[in-house]
Amino acid sequence: MTERLVAIDIDEGSLGARSSEVDHERKVAMHDLLEENRFAPVGGEDKGPYRLKLFEQNGRLVFDVSTEAGDPLIQHHLSMTPFRRLIKDYFMLCETYYDAIRAAMPEKLETVDMARRSVHNEATELLQKRLEGKISTDFDTARRLFTLICSISLRASSRGDR
């Protein structure tokens, strides 16, 4: 299948200080994305598979898409503003979830995990809507991309860009 990603690069300069849990989530998302995804820039469907470089620039998320050989195809810039509340809520719920794991509170885990998944789903739907007409993805691909966006948002928030 040509409508897929074969490489993902997140600019290290765009990544913020992160906990081991956040770093693990990012690595799992990248691994899972490369294992299974559906990704096609509109107008470039016949040029895949694709390489994706994600980075933050001036408060905007940049999707830099190239061919598998590295030939530039397209760049899309998305404002991070529509994602701010969801990213903040997601990180808050993740911290609560990790705290519940560390404190061995299984009764709290299920409730917090359900809330975390709900926010993640809402953010995934927003990402798909924001990419509409630019990049076509399936839900699971967009969900994993949102996880990567969260990693990038940490740097923007630590610099006060949020």
Image (cartoon, helix red, strand yellow):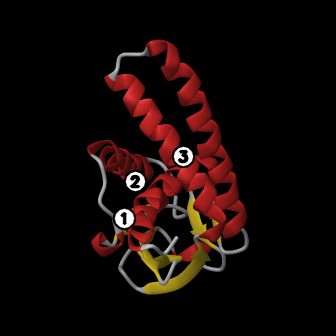
Q: Residue pushed farthest top? A: 107
Q: Please tell me whether residue 95 is drawn above or below residue 101 in the rendered image.
A: below
Of residues 140 and 127, the one drawn nearer to the viewer in this rendering: 127
* CA neighbours of label 1 inside 10 A, class few (<14), some (14 to 19), many (20+): some
Mark 3 sits on what residue? 90
Disc ID at residue 34: 2
Of residues 124 and 119, the one drawn nearer to the viewer in this rendering: 119
Q: Earlier in the sequence, mark 1 or mark 3?
A: 1
User: Measured from the top left, where is residue 142 in percent x and y?
Assistant: 58, 55
Tag 3: amino acid: Tyr
Q: Earlier in the sequence, mark 1 or mark 2?
A: 1
Tag 1: amino acid: Ala
Q: Are marks 1 and 2 in contact (CB under 8 Å)?
A: yes
Disc ID at residue 7: 1
User: Measured from the top left, where is residue 99 in percent x and y?
Assistant: 38, 30
Q: Nearer the viewer, mark 1 or mark 3?
A: 3
Q: Earlier in the sequence, mark 2 or mark 3?
A: 2
User: Measured from the top left, where is residue 91 in percent x and y?
Assistant: 48, 47
Q: Please tell me whether residue 102 is drawn above or below residue 125 in the rendered image.
A: above
Q: Please tell me whether residue 15 is drawn above or below residue 96 in the rendered image.
A: below
Tag 2: amino acid: Leu
